[in-house]
Image: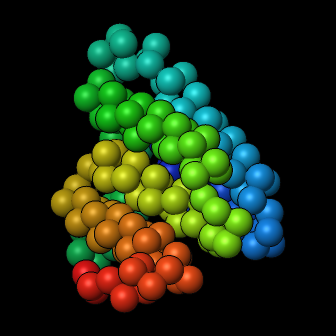
Amino acid sequence: MDLVYLLLLPFAGSLLAALMPTHARTAAAGWAALVSLAALVWVALLFPTLQTGQVLHEEYRWIPSAGINFSVRMDGFAWMFAMLVTGIGLLVALYARYYMSKNDPVPRIFSFFLSLTDAITAVVLSDNVVQLVSFCALTRLFCYMQIRSWYHRYADRHSPRI
């Protein structure tokens, strides 16, 4: 159940970030950094289990008529990439607070950022092709939505559609 909660943590954090007022720059940045740090620590704490050669695997019924289950899997390779995603996510959350101007919709941007980080982590932990493709599509969607959040800038508002 740890891996599913690991995927739910940034998503829940993104929902709370979306509910913050638009002027809550420091609170949104701090919240995104805290959620990213929690995910990073969570992944790091799984290392002793994986160091022994075990593979963490969880499976739940998803689309039973098609025989497709929601399954997440973490081995040493997936752990390394999950550490990279969550670690870089933490660094980006810390840097982005000072990068953005006062006119930027910071809570909305951090909400999409946490969702993007979660989708990338889900790609890393996917155990079947249907999930992999679904989470890749979510990654593209959240990346697009994050870029489009800078609606007050002409270049971003009139950028080519993907």
Who's the residue at 63% across and 70% down the image?
104
Q: Nearer the viewer, residue 85 or 146?
A: 146
Who's the residue at 25% across and 59% down the image?
132
Horizontal and vertical percent position of residue 13: 66, 57
Instruction: Please indicate, yes or no, whether residue 12 appears anywhere in the rendered image.
Output: no
**Side (left or right) of 88 relative to 35:** left
Q: Nearer the viewer, residue 38 or 54?
A: 38
**Side (left or right) of 30 relative to 42:** right
Residue 38 location, quadrant:
top right
Quadrant into which the N terminus falls: top right
Q: Is residue 133 above or below residue 150?
A: above
Horizontal and vertical percent position of residue 140: 32, 69
Horizontal and vertical percent position of residue 141: 37, 74
**Protein image colouring:** rainbow
Instruction: Please indicate, yes or no, whether residue 88 appears anywhere in the rendered image.
Output: yes
Extreme residue in the left direction? 129
Q: Is residue 37 above or below residue 23?
A: above
Horizontal and vertical percent position of residue 75: 30, 29
Quadrant into which the C terminus falls: bottom left
Who's the residue at 50% across and 24% down the image?
44
Who's the residue at 58% across and 28% down the image?
41
**Side (left or right) of 75 relative to 102:** left
Q: Is residue 27 above or below residue 65?
A: above
